[in-house]
Amino acid sequence: MTVGIHSAHITCCCLAILLCSLLLPATCPAKGTESTNGAIKTNRIHIGKLKQQIEHHLEKIRQNSEQEISLLGELKQIDEKLGAEKKKLAELQQELAEQHKLLAEKTSELNQISQTRDRVRRHLEKRLRSFYLMGKTGFLNIAFSRKNLPELMLFDDAYKRMLQYDQAIISRYRRTIADLTQAKQDIELQKNILAGLVRQAEEEEQSLQAVRQEKSRLLTRIKSKKGLYEQAVREMQRAEHDLTKTITRLQRKKRNQKRGFLLNKGRLQGPVEGELVVRFGQIVDDSPSKGIIIHTGDNTPVVSIYTGKVIFAGYKLGYGNMVIIDHGLGYYTITAHLDDITVNSGDRVLGGRQIGTTGDIATLFSKGLYFEIRKNSTPLNPLKWLSANAYPKLIPLPHPKLNDELPLTTVRKRVIFPGGRNHMKTGKK
């Protein structure tokens, strides 16, 4: 049993180490959806292991509870036997005490009768001695006595009857003494028997007490072991609860990562430093603009406004160098009229990462960087998504000078989005 408790202690220690190791991954925030998914998967595996350990320890608790109930039943029976033995011992001791008292009374009575008998005996001996000295009634007694013959005969007869009476008394005392002696012996025998029964009851009580103490120690060890298992289960349940909360937090983080673009509406940074020259919906070349145009200097870094995946990075007719980034949940940003592109298709980018630069090539299409936000194929107003101080005021775009050699016409430029969705843009040719 000591080994069992030691094993339970080791189990708890190992459990503490296991719990620490299980909880460590939850303290490190995952970077990106893949890391979050990996952390969720890892924590689910840990929860599965914890549930197995909890079930194992609950089985141990159940077994210990059964042993505890069994021992409690045995202790109850032992206590009942102890109660009966104590009652029996008390009765025997009471009876033994009464026998002692009765024996003392008989002994005292026997002593008194013996003393009385001795007195009668001494008195009788004196009478016998006097009778012997007096001798039988004969001629000389009659001759020398002052009493006449009838008186002497009467005295002799009375004396003999008195001696017979004394002898009868002595005989009765002898019988009484014999009876008292027998009674005393019987009492002594009964006392010895009772003393043996008392010793036997005391030994039985001691034996039962020893068994009870052993059962009590065993029960204490079982309760201690059960307590260790219960403590382990509580710790594992707390760990499971913590891991469940961690998974919930990671799932919420995962959802927020997908919804992060939407959740940051109105707080996103601008794609480039510069001045706004065309607003969303503003009529340019007889068509409403589906994005905004930002006037900026050459070689100005252009950045991603939020975390996402580059799904296109290259040249598109009518847009020049262009980068399309998928921010999740159907949200896309289109950054065009770049002089140089510094990312590749398939790259994952964080908010604020440079994706290109501006330059002279932008002036071939417009007076600055073109930027658009879409929900699937629906253009959205970027100014409602960017922070208020990104482009606080509009710088009017000067009227473009027409090229006398080229007729002014409008053409439709098409950009293919994932899933076959089209991006339509009106431009000059």
Image: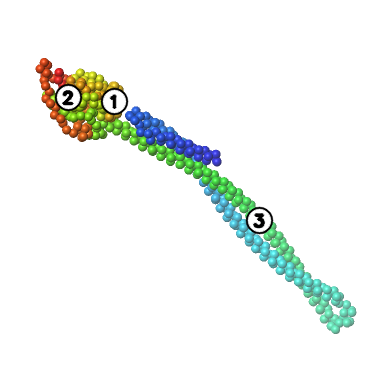
- Given the image, on which type of amino acid does mark 1 rest? Lys
Q: Residue 324's spot in the image, x, y percent? A: 25, 24
Residue 195 numbered mark, or none: 3
Residue drawn at x 41%, y 39% as measured from the top left:
238
Is label 1 in a helix, a strand or a loop?
A: strand
Is label 3 in a helix, a strand or a loop?
A: helix
Q: Residues within 10 Å of mark 1 (few under 14, many from 20)?
A: some
Reading the chain from its start, which is encountered first: label 2 or label 1? 1
Reading the chain from its start, which is encountered first: label 1 or label 3? 3
Distance from disc 2 to disc 1, alpha carbons, whole Å, reads: 28 Å
Left or right of residue 112: residue 29? left
Residue drawn at x 29%, y 29% as measured from the top left:
350
Q: Residue 260's spot in the image, x, y percent? A: 27, 32
Left or right of residue 305: residue 184? right
Nearer to us in this view, 282 or 201 = 282
Q: Nearer the viewer, mark 2 or mark 1?
A: 2
Distance from disc 1 to disc 3, alpha carbons, whole Å, reads: 100 Å
- Place residue 105 in its image quadrant: bottom right
Residue under label 2: 367
Distance from disc 2 to disc 3, alpha carbons, whole Å, reads: 124 Å
Q: Residue 63's spot in the image, x, y percent? A: 49, 39
- Given the image, on which type of amino acid does mark 3 rest? Ala
Q: Nearer the viewer, mark 1 or mark 3?
A: 1
Nearer to us in this view, 280 or 54 = 280
The residue furthest left is: 404
Nearer to us in this view, 319 or 208 = 319
- Given the image, on which type of amino acid does mark 2 rest? Lys
Reading the chain from its start, which is encountered first: label 2 or label 3? 3
Quadrant (top left, top right, bottom left, bottom right) of the C terminus:
top left
Residue under label 1: 309
Residue drawn at x 65%, y 60% as measured from the top left:
99
- Place residue 259 in its image quadrant: top left
